[in-house]
Image (cartoon, coloured by chain):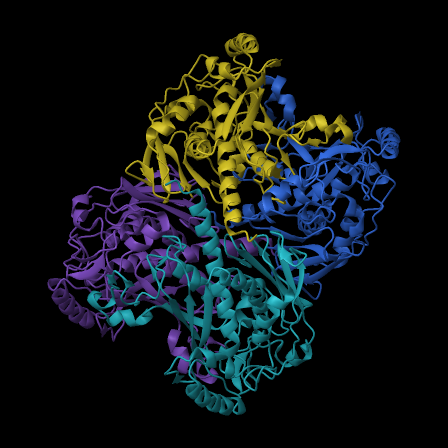
Chain colours: A cyan, B purple, C yellow, D blue
Amino acid sequence: MAGNSFGTAFRITTFGESHGKGVGVIVDGVPPGVPLTEEDIQPEMDRRKPGQSDLTTPRKESDEVSIQSGTFEDKTTGTPLMMILHNTNTISSDYNDVLDKYRPGHADYTYHKKYGFRDWRGSGRASGRETAGRVAAGAVAKKILKDRGITITAYTKAAAGISCESYVPEQIEKNPMRACDPAAAEKMVKVIERLKEEGNSAGGIIECRINGVPAGLGEPVFDKLEADLGKGILSIGAVKGFEIGEGFGVASMFGTEHNDEMSAEGFVTNHAGGITGGISTGQEIIFRAAVKPTASISAPQKTVNMKGEEVDIVTEGRHDPIICPRIVPVMEAMAAIVLCDHLLRFEAQKSLQIS
Amino acid sequence: MAGNSFGTAFRITTFGESHGKGVGVIVDGVPPGVPLTEEDIQPEMDRRKPGQSDLTTPRKESDEVSIQSGTFEDKTTGTPLMMILHNTNTISSDYNDVLDKYRPGHADYTYHKKYGFRDWRGSGRASGRETAGRVAAGAVAKKILKDRGITITAYTKAAAGISCESYVPEQIEKNPMRACDPAAAEKMVKVIERLKEEGNSAGGIIECRINGVPAGLGEPVFDKLEADLGKGILSIGAVKGFEIGEGFGVASMFGTEHNDEMSAEGFVTNHAGGITGGISTGQEIIFRAAVKPTASISAPQKTVNMKGEEVDIVTEGRHDPIICPRIVPVMEAMAAIVLCDHLLRFEAQKSLQIS
Amino acid sequence: MAGNSFGTAFRITTFGESHGKGVGVIVDGVPPGVPLTEEDIQPEMDRRKPGQSDLTTPRKESDEVSIQSGTFEDKTTGTPLMMILHNTNTISSDYNDVLDKYRPGHADYTYHKKYGFRDWRGSGRASGRETAGRVAAGAVAKKILKDRGITITAYTKAAAGISCESYVPEQIEKNPMRACDPAAAEKMVKVIERLKEEGNSAGGIIECRINGVPAGLGEPVFDKLEADLGKGILSIGAVKGFEIGEGFGVASMFGTEHNDEMSAEGFVTNHAGGITGGISTGQEIIFRAAVKPTASISAPQKTVNMKGEEVDIVTEGRHDPIICPRIVPVMEAMAAIVLCDHLLRFEAQKSLQIS
Amino acid sequence: MAGNSFGTAFRITTFGESHGKGVGVIVDGVPPGVPLTEEDIQPEMDRRKPGQSDLTTPRKESDEVSIQSGTFEDKTTGTPLMMILHNTNTISSDYNDVLDKYRPGHADYTYHKKYGFRDWRGSGRASGRETAGRVAAGAVAKKILKDRGITITAYTKAAAGISCESYVPEQIEKNPMRACDPAAAEKMVKVIERLKEEGNSAGGIIECRINGVPAGLGEPVFDKLEADLGKGILSIGAVKGFEIGEGFGVASMFGTEHNDEMSAEGFVTNHAGGITGGISTGQEIIFRAAVKPTASISAPQKTVNMKGEEVDIVTEGRHDPIICPRIVPVMEAMAAIVLCDHLLRFEAQKSLQIS
């Protein structure tokens, strides 16, 4: 009902607020026997954490993950895996100035309308910090998938109006934009550094490729693989669009162009993006997400306070001028969770099939 | 697990195949006391049914809906509402020629990989006919929402490369494209009639506007209102993308442009599309979906058969050269189901709130 | 939310009322490839249907089950199985006399309090007729289980104060009480025939044995196998108690008596009833349920009407003086659904286990 | 799937093992605005914790509960409430002697069969320590219920063959058995102290009364209030039976005896135990549970080890000769969680009702 869980067979429930004691996740449905320690999780946490470059918020969080349950002698037991990250750097006073104002582009107003009051410290549950739990769970999913040859790679495809023109996967983690084209990345950085100085922010597009997925994953009606991926990705704050394969490009294509023909070697093209009728084709799955400009900007804006009076607002806090580089690992995590869930469901169905 | 249900508090489960005995739906969670007869449902069924114009498949289905349970003296009782539409026109022989071939753009190959075998008659469960149950359930949701002043309007925004340039809501149901711009509709019809003659098909974009939604609907983390809308829409066959508000346009916007400022009269702009942080703002909700060209085309294509041999395929059947006009009511139905579900959840939370 | 579904991986949703158009069920999660026709289901329906003997209501229902979806060429396809039984004998006028009175022992009063009004015809959804859908779904589950050597047998263990003293399984279906001891059955029949003449009714105990279950089914915490069995059985109207193994007898046992020791040949005793820590031991699972006397009796009783006025009531209708014989197949059905669900979940977990 | 969650609208997920870092719970669906601090929870934890009397295990755990998320300024925010209790006294070496032996009456064998290996330290997840999370969540539910005048009282009704003959509620918390009859309690203590010396254990019956429940709670089919209570109670380790109202006594009652008649003042009797047709009647809800003798006894028993060899076993550890007094608060907690869940669902339904 309250929507803090995601997944069916591999199911995560996140908890925690930006400025509370910590954030974390319970993963239920982890198969027993998977070798797992904090060292498997921490590298993903580090990719998400603040303070990685000039383009990310200077808030410093060590983001050290601790496994509290679900493993024994460094293997999963099949019982719930609880992982927590304690908050260490929560300067609530940063928010004193905005506590009675609705920040434009933020969930302040809607939370107030929903709950009747709100945790004004760093957005509470609406903070990007909630995604730490997702990334921890995603690291577990990734490990299970990797064992079956399934890998997931996300990267910035476009940002601040600049698009990548090449795909150089080994360069992704080497530039602060996590862009797939190092030349485009350089240009992006320049524009965004300027925006940062102006107290402004930029949006972008993230693309994700999943390789090694066998044909047959996904359910035919509501839990289509693309519908579950779509929900997972759209549940990440700041995401305003999701498309798979040709995506919105299909609007000006013909059936003769879009249909993927087959030869004895398999599919000839992949306009569908690796999923047809909700079920994986065995090809690369490729999708994109639109990420809005960070709402927290220091340029002055007009808003109202809780009494409904018009006021000016300047969001001081510590924020990212573009959120794409830090959303990249979150997107991979959500994709991994969806894939792992459908893998479990596929295996369950297979195991009972009478042939 | 098998994914034939959708929704949490207002929950639907569809059943039935294109060429079986019938299709239908169970709706669980309908509040008691809602006046309801088949006459409330049938008009929506008629908007979805085949044979409405030259642009839709000539397959004739009366699509008469029958309420089998859940009402008493023309009111809902709070027990499960079962609605069924019997299949009356199922010419399986239409499919004799393709029964061992994988039709490009169809789910034939993926179903085979998933289930080990498949119902080759008219795509079975992957058929658009499955959506009849969704539309019936959506009609119930619409009625509940209308009672609270919430209305939903979808329409073709672009098709075959032609975009609407005006928004004339009263013209939508008056042209066979269900486009919001009658002049664009005329052009679309001309292009698509030509494509039909060539045995080809076209894609398009559908836009949906929801008015009268109070602020506060949606859950903050995984069940964000836009995530549930996204899943509902992406679970409709042929949909390859979903975006809300500025959608993919955010990629080249700045924070200063995208943030919706507030004045004493409320929000000044609506770039967010009526949802911020997963929760409705009280503004119009506006989203778009990309619809791929109909996969069934009579132009010859290359594929393989179940033995893996390369073969030519011509899909004779009876198909739509563009599916947008018939997806419009399905999209409204899914949007209505999501809104009704979140309305119930919102009311539940409110009812227990201690203030 | 509204609680008309049961099960996780093998999930049923029932619909329909006693005096509406029909009753039925959707089963989601049926593995593909199971040979299945109405002939597999009908025998179970016949065991549940009214009019089998002098001890059951004379209401005549052919109870012919029809599979409406989910099979193709007499095999399951993995898509939702919808089965329906049309109501053919619904004499609502039987209920004219009671329509504004709350029948003692019935759900009339509670439904009214819950929904604000009620379908007074034959109890609507609270009628035993709702269980027809469960029995149809149970027949499918039984078939899947039988294929793996798992069988389920329920029978009347005690009724009207008379207990069975022997266990003769082949006699169960040969006496109208479905009792496991033919001598006790004869005595029960005599007492109940007398009660019937007096317009009275009797209660009883049903016992159920499940054989062939492998060790390892069930989940360790909330979804313990006995907890899910308990819920399934307690969700059958008229059931007021559930116990497994020694059941309430444990209250006067010592640990040294109750603990089941093991030898090289396996467990020496089975006080636990085949489940320990929520998980099957591989032994026979044995449980019992308490069934209250049929609430509908023709002896005059005191009650109030909807205005709160004290009135006398005589329930004419057509009712069973004891419901045990007809609950036996319902209990088997619920047990089969729980076992099939946990079998699927067990296989799912096994399939992903890394060893 | 893995069954570590319970409830629908008020939903708990527990985590943690007996000898890991800690145990705890996430509660999702807590209404916002409930005043809540650790001081509301701790008294319930103290009622469950070990070492309260000579009849409980001498394992010392401070069982200090810490709220990690979901509150702000000592009020719930409507976001997930995470509560944790760190394990402080985990002497794994206690288990060295049994680590390769299956303890009779324990889940050692079944866990091994299910998962392929097991956490042998203090039963891992099968330990009674898992219930700490339930008690914490139950304390929250109790607080919400109390605000609406709903109170829950459980107590030992019978133990070691001795039954209570009076009901003196104010004496329950004053005797180490938590029995409702102080004279019976004294006798129970004597017998159990002797059993303790002999390395043996005893079973018992716990009764629970819920007062102040309005009529109308519960769902009519699978989620009957007694079915959900039954599942909740049967999911507590050591519980082998559940009965409501007259329970198994109904087997020798007549309809004329069992039916609860009504007068202008309301129900005349309460044989049903406060629930009819799955829905609360507004009367006291009364149910009982059978609790098996503690499986861990120090008297020597016969079993096998993991190699299948016959061995003797003596469970040294630190255990309770009877678990009833410590299960009393757990049973109240599970009852509170079920009631709170159905209260939320009832309110949700009411809020949308059209009248």
Q: Nearer the viewer, residue A134 or A142?
A: A142
Q: Is residue A335 above or below residue D257?
A: below
Task: Give left or right: position of B344 versus C164.
Answer: left
Looking at the image, residue D297 lies above or below residue D19: above
Q: Which image quarter holds the C terminus of chain A?
A: top left
**Residue A267, placed above or below residue D103:** below
Q: Nearer the viewer, residue A14 or C121?
A: A14
Q: Position of residue D321 (x, y in %)?
A: 81, 36
Q: Which residue is nearer to you in this view: A74 or B353? A: A74
**Residue D308 shown left or right of residue A203 in the figure:** right
Tell me the quarter of the picture where residue D298 sits. Answer: top right
Query: Residue B333: image x %, image y %?
Result: 35, 55
Where residue A277 appears, x then y in whole percent?
Answer: 32, 57
Expressed as whole percent of the image width and height from the top left, the position of residue C72 reads 29, 40
Compare residues D226 and D193 and report the one nearer the observer.
D193
**Viewer can see residue B259:** no
